Amino acid sequence: MKNNVTVVCGGGGFIGGHLVADLRRQGIGPIRSVDVKPFDGWYQKFDGVENLVLDLQDKAACERAMQGASVVYNLAADMGGMGFIENNKALCMLSVLINTHLLMAAKTAGVDRFFYASSACVYNGSKQTDPSITGLKEEDAYPAMPEDGYGWEKLFSERMCRHFREDYGVKTRVARYHNVYGPEGTWDGGREKAPAAVCRKVIAAKLAGKHEIEIWGDGNQTRSFMYIDDCLKGTQMLTHSDYVEPINIGSSEKVTINQLVDLAESIAGVKLKRNYKLDAPKGVNGRNSDNTLIQKVFGWEPSIPLRTGLEKTYAWIHDQMVSQAKSK
């Protein structure tokens, strides 16, 4: 049977769910969406899609997922925000089984394109000590000193993709995502990332009338945050291109965490007292995406302003919190 299925691994997750939705909007099909979570835990689930609950750490599950596959997007990983990453290094490392078994199955199935979602956490930590960092270039991943646990797994899996491409002809493509955010994702429970966490805290303070917020670290650490729509465009552009090396897909709009809070407060129309939890996980001091290479290769870079994306994210999380409060 000719391979013609587009497979989204991690399709029940935040980015995966948005990707399936975008593929459907484009009329691409058939689509297979695969996730380890039971269906009631998927962020988005669609009719007209082959939805499968499979543990992709298992080799047989990966073989099932790859049957008839033409294009594969591997977004599956056991991960979360900095609090989760720093406290669950072994769990993060076990995601290496997902990409390894998927690559093996993709090779056997004759998959045409294989996209792997890596992370800015692969970058050398010594280059991220200064909040005033301008940006991380792709070559800054070596000499290797990535984020412990999660970053090492991502860097190793990048190498696996490289060698499956070089040795077996699997057309792998690798993106290093920088902090993807947006609606229809994790906003509480410990796995949420900074934009969702900040929105949740600001909304909670406003709804409760308790005008205080806890910030992890001193708030001076810098990051860039990429809205989901830019992530989807860059991912599909890279997947179907001839560019084979790992490349940044991230916004270059650098802000401090304090500035991120400023934006959320402005959207909410409140001003909160800030309590800094200096012993909380805060990650590196400075991280931003250098987009020189993606501009050169594709004439494009993520460009949706943080304010624009955060307004949409805030509104969605606000609706979730109000709905949740009413149901109690």
Image: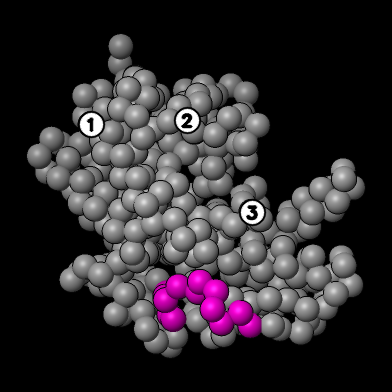
Coloring basis for residues? one colour
Res 208 quadrant in image: bottom right
Numbered mark located on residue 189 in the image: 3
Q: In the rendering, at what x and y percent does residue 46 appear?
A: 62, 29
In the picture shown, does residue 321 fall above or below 282? above
Q: CA distance from mark 1 to mark 2?
A: 17 Å
**Front in this rendered view, residue 195 or 219:** 219
| Quadrant occupied by the C terminus | top right
Q: Residue flagged by tag 3: what amino acid is it?
A: Gly
Q: CA distance from mark 3 to mark 1?
A: 33 Å
- Check if residue 287 falls in the magenta segment: yes
Q: Residue flagged by tag 2: what amino acid is it?
A: Val
Helix, strand or loop: magenta stretch: loop
- SS for callout 3: loop
Magenta-tinted stretch: 276-288
- SS for callout 1: helix
User: Residue placed at 24% from the left, 53% from the top?
Assistant: 156
Q: In the rendering, at what x and y percent does residue 254 appear?
A: 50, 78
Q: Residue flagged by tag 1: what amino acid is it?
A: Met
| 76 relative position to 145: left or right | right
